[in-house]
Image: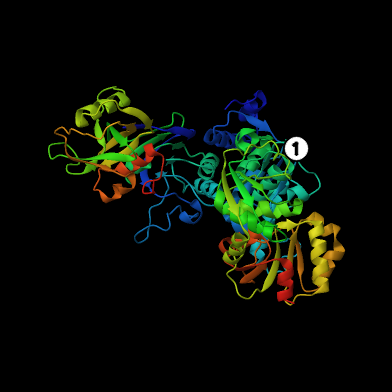
Amino acid sequence: MKIRGRGIVPGHAAGMAIVSHAPFSFVGGVDPRTGELLDQAGEPPHPRLQGRIFAFPGGKGSTVGSYLIYGLAKTGNGPAGIVNARTEAIVAVGATLAGIPLVDRVDVGGLRTGDRMTVDGDRGTVELPDIRATPVVSVVLRNRGRILVVRRSEDVGSFRGRWSAISGYLEGREDPRHRAVREVREETGLKGITFRATGPPLLARDDRTIYVIHPFLFDTPKRQVRLDWENVEHRWIRPEELDRFDTVPRLPDVVAAVLGRAPGSAA
Amino acid sequence: MRLTQAHRRLLVAGTNAQRTALRILETVARISGAQRLVRIGSAHVSGASYKLMGDAGLGFLEDFARDATVAVPTTVNPLGTDLAQWRDLGVPPEFAEKQDRIARAYVAMGVQPIFSCTPYLLGIRPKFGEHLAWAESNAVCFANSVLGARSNRESGPSALAAAVVGATPDYGLHTDRGRLPTVVVAVDTKPRGIDYSLIGLVAGERVGDGLPFFRGFRGNETDLKWLGAALASSGSCAMFHLEGVTPEARKARVKGLKSVRITRADLTAAKRAHTDGTEAEMIGLGSPQLSAEELQEVARKVERRPPRIPVWVFTSRVVRDANPEAVATVERTGGRVLADTCLEVTLLEHRFGTVATPSGKGAYYLPSLCKQKVIFDDLDTLLERYA
């Protein structure tokens, strides 16, 4: 699959991914002489950045980190490419000094250590040749501060029995927002809904498949729901109650993305 | 981002350092959404203390200095020790040698050989409305707020790149919109002395990366230097307005902004929160470096009441050289006056475990950068306590 992000530092790189799901500080986070990652779970030796595509949400810590990235590259111990969710000056300037291609605005939540990937810093894309992309919509329906969650039936193809927003596969080159409205009508019978928000796609991983989730928020004037065969149960909940439910992957992030707040934070 | 013809030519025909510098500015512009570069009157670069820069920083600077020359007047932040006194201070020779190499690398680029965190006190002050690429947070805050000059909070490498190119990406505090206040901070107690640092610390915690509009008190330039330094430490603020005092406060619109209040109780609590030591081994005065007037005042005070623990004063080389009598007085009473270095970036931790200081910025950074315990109080109280 190909992920469209934003090119920050030009150039091309290919390699196996090392993925960190927490913001990363190069100062204290990596051995400047060897490129070995420090503070990792498990026993040493820890993975080395050399020749790898290093994916992490973004940088943090001291701006000396920029010089550290430069130093790693100079001694041949640096990563071949960098992928960020939201890059910032420490990492981006370091990658610039080091000549390491950098693409950001990629949801690293869908990437795994060991994935083969190529980074194109000119076009702002990341490609994963072994991974199939399945685009879907995920629609948060809201009525007077509560949102709708539905439990998936035993007849659907994935995530049976888990709680979800209204969702469906995108077909062909279909407009995601158009598909969103259609799924709401089919799965709930609700009409007269109003578009409120969308956001950049989130990536949910399921083995060799990445679900590319287009998140949406719609307001509905009514709460009366008529479920179809895809779901067996529904609830109108407060957003902060979501962590009590066994949900499909990334649902809290989808809700946070369209409601504009951090997952788990109070309303 | 649109480049001028001259800048496009640099990308093709410039030196290695010029091309690297321009690429850094392009990267920063891409992240920030800046559409063009704006010419700057001066640059102030951070990243000079070997204690913080380490071998990675030293390595980069020596490589970069091979063919880099600054295009505008450029000053650099304090070093990790006073290179004229390092032996007396017990600084390890390897540290001093590497620190000297960092200083030489900068000087080779054509910067002024003054290592100071108070470039606004070195004689030439930025003019109102002048664009700058400054990296030291207290200096950025002072230049924007008190002088009405315009600088973002640059990083070390971005300020250095701007110095070489003579321009910086045009966004944030370079634009009129970026200088509007985002929150009103009403102070309902009359500050004096250390209170300015305390107001800064409390406000920084409350407003984060916002742009505060203060009201309810007044202060002179020195007061605002301490306020801004503390504000830029506990928050990521790069500018503030003070009603009736700072030059852009009158134009700033505050209608409809969120308002927070700071009381005497908040200041007392903040002072307590930043004190974790019980017995100080030295009194550290700097962070930011003291002005000539402040150095003279310290000399008068220690002469009147010589303290039993050493007083270390951090100032610029300019001020130290111009005030030999004050320096002699401080040294006669067991203290030191150090130049080209400052409280939290200097090598202190090998000698002192607990430092007493009236600096809000110092109290904020000493525990993390230097692993030291702090006693945070005003100078008169400290001199009385350690008489």
Q: Residue at x 67, y 26 (%)?
A: B6
Q: Is residue B311 above or below residue A165?
A: below
Q: Quadrant of residue B273?
A: bottom right
Q: Quadrant of residue B167?
A: top right
Q: How is the image coloured?
A: rainbow
> Residue at label 1?
B128
Q: Is residue A198 above or below residue B212?
A: above
Q: Is residue A104 left or right of residue A115?
A: right
Q: Is residue B21 above or below residue B121?
A: above
Q: Residue at x 69, y 48 (%)?
A: B139
Who is closer to the viewer here, B86 or A204? A204
Identify the secondary structure beneath mark 1. loop
Total residue callouts: 1
The N terminus of chain A: image quadrant: top left
Note whether residue B45 is visible: no
Q: Is residue B157 left or right of residue A79?
A: right
Who is closer to the viewer here, A260 or B367? A260
Residue B7 image offset from top left, x and y in percent? 65, 28
What's the chain of the residue with tag 1? B
Q: Quadrant of residue A147?
A: top left
Residue A161 image offset from top left, x and y in percent? 17, 44
Q: Amino acid at mark 1?
A: Phe
Note whether residue B111 is visible: yes
Q: Residue at x 63, y 48 (%)?
A: B61
Residue A124 image offset from top left, x and y in percent? 43, 31
Q: Is residue B154 left or right of residue A202?
A: right
